[in-house]
Image: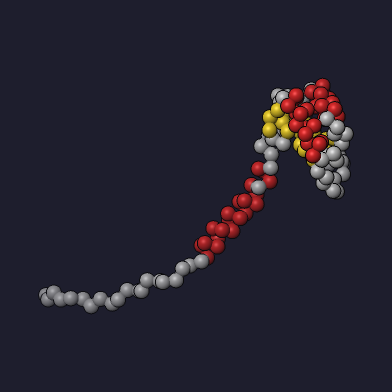
Amino acid sequence: MSFGRLERTPGPKPMSEINMTPLVDVMLVLVVIFIITAPLLASSIQLDLPKAQASPVSAAPKFVTVVVDQSGQTFLDDQALTLTELATQLAQAVRLNPDLEVQLRADTAVPYGRIVDVMGIAQKAGLNRIGFVTDPKPPAAP
């Protein structure tokens, strides 16, 4: 029995090119994730809006958003305020833009009196255009 060296063939050479396919796949998945999550980040205040049938607004004028959550806390553009602070902020906003509109988003659990208080504050500040934001009502089954 003789021991000898076995001839070795050289293995495959390392690939010196960058494979772009996995990079493109990862980027496309990230784009899809951002497209899906972007609308969810629009408002961080969780509300149960009332349902109503209405036509969609065709032109969006300048507006401020006033939110009343289910605990009765008032927000102006996602900033928590008391009613007196809300009145001063709305008065300042009217001085900057007299054609301003208020979009009122109120939870269904909020007492009507609290909504009327907010509407009165807006009217005293000089805001006569108030829009009520609702979720679309599902179509009735025949």
- Asked whether, in this view, residue 23 is left or right of residue 40, the answer is left
Q: Quadrant of the C terminus?
A: top right
Which quadrant of the view contains residue 97? top right
Image coordinates of residue 4 in percent, x first then y, are 15, 76
Q: Vertical placement of 140 versus 8: above or below? A: above
Image coordinates of residue 72 in percent, x first then y, are 73, 24
Q: Vertical placement of 120 versus 133: above or below? A: above
Image coordinates of residue 38 in percent, x first then y, are 65, 47
Give the camera-side residue of 34 and 68: 68
Give the camera-side residue of 84 and 16: 84
Residue ID at (82%, 46%)? 60
Q: Residue furthest left?
A: 1
Residue ID at (65%, 43%)? 41
Q: Quadrant of the N terminus?
A: bottom left
Residue ID at (52%, 62%)? 23
Image coordinates of residue 128 in percent, x first then y, are 88, 34
Q: Visible in this render: residue 115?
A: no
Residue ID at (82%, 27%)? 121
